[in-house]
Image: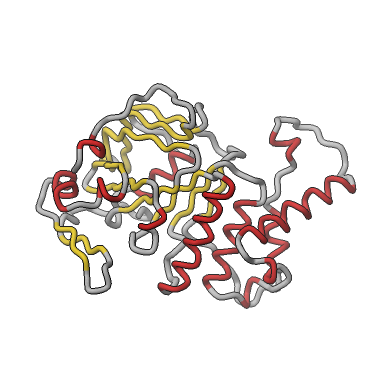
Amino acid sequence: MHDAALRRPATSPRDGDVLVADRLRVAYGGRTVWRDATFRVQRGEFVAIIGPNGAGKTTLFRLLLGLIRPDAGTLRVFNAPPRRGQPQVGYVPQTHLVDRETNVEAVQLVRLNFTDPRRRRGLRWLPPVTPSALRAEREATDEALAAVGATELARQPLGGMSGGELQRIFLAEALVSRPEMLLLDEPLANLDLRRSRELVEVVHGLVRSRGVTTLLVAHDINPLIRCLDKVIYIANGRVATGTPEEVLTTEGLTALYGVPVEVLHDSRGNLVIVGGEDVHPDPGDS
């Protein structure tokens, strides 16, 4: 791996830092998932988190959401330890259960996730709902749906939507409270190549137009690679970070895994990573 990808960054806060990790170690069920992870993500970066099943990609999201704590090292999000319900962070989980018989409209789901800005400022007591508050809620909902190209889906029931349409609605749901960072866990799963590329373009547009820092867990790097600023690659208990050109090389991944790995290109120009997948999955983790 190029020196830039292996070099440990200084962990003192820098202007533009959204996420700073210093020598993190995480254990699950008595086994170390990964260790000595040091990296940073800056405002407005589009970052893919990739690696084999069970490597600990979703574990990183659990840390960032304040659901678990590291066993060692430090992690700061917006210059503070992560905490549950952090309003600057929008999250789309890996699994959404949608009843195909449901008549709940997309706009209703998105509106449910709206957070009154006064509550985000720490005001626990709020006056009764006012016309201006309702107007703010409607405007934020309409804005979120428009941002993901789903305005025409607003009044459609969730039960009748395709996988690609649902992912846009879930993304709007995460955006409605105007977060500064998005965590997207496997949003491309079960989408065909065309729908995957369309969703990536939507997310990339949000990153560029709004400056929303975005971390996206994916199994397949190919739909993402031309839009990415950075890759976080998790495998065999180690974490590497850098640009795609720095991380996704035969030399770099061989060094990361400690066993021979080849980075190839198929006839369509897609990346194929061969070898090095000697990991032991954790239940429920990806």
In-image side of 59 versus 233 (left or right):
right
Left or right of 239? Residue 66 is right
Q: Quadrant of residue 167?
A: bottom right
**In the displayed structure, does residue 130 sit left or right of residue 101?**
right
Is residue 198 found left or right of 22 in the rendered image?
A: right
x%, y% of residue 40?
38, 34
User: Looking at the picture, how far across and down is residue 112, in whole percent?
Assistant: 71, 54
Camera-side residue: 152 or 99? Answer: 152
Along the line of sight, the residue nearer the viewer: 230 or 190 = 230
Quadrant for the C terminus, please: bottom left
Q: Where in the figure is residue 259, as x and y percent of width and height?
A: 10, 50
Query: What's the residue at 67%, 70% (across, down)?
Result: 153
Q: Is residue 70 above or below residue 109?
A: above
Viewer-side residue, 246 vs 81? 246
Q: Residue at x 60, y 44 (%)?
A: 179
Question: Which quadrant does the N terminus fall into?
Answer: top left
Q: Is residue 191 above or below residue 66?
A: below
Residue located at (70% from left, 49% from top): 114
Q: Residue at x 47, y 58 (%)?
A: 94
Percent across and percent down for residue 8 are: 27, 30
Q: Residue farthest to the left? A: 260
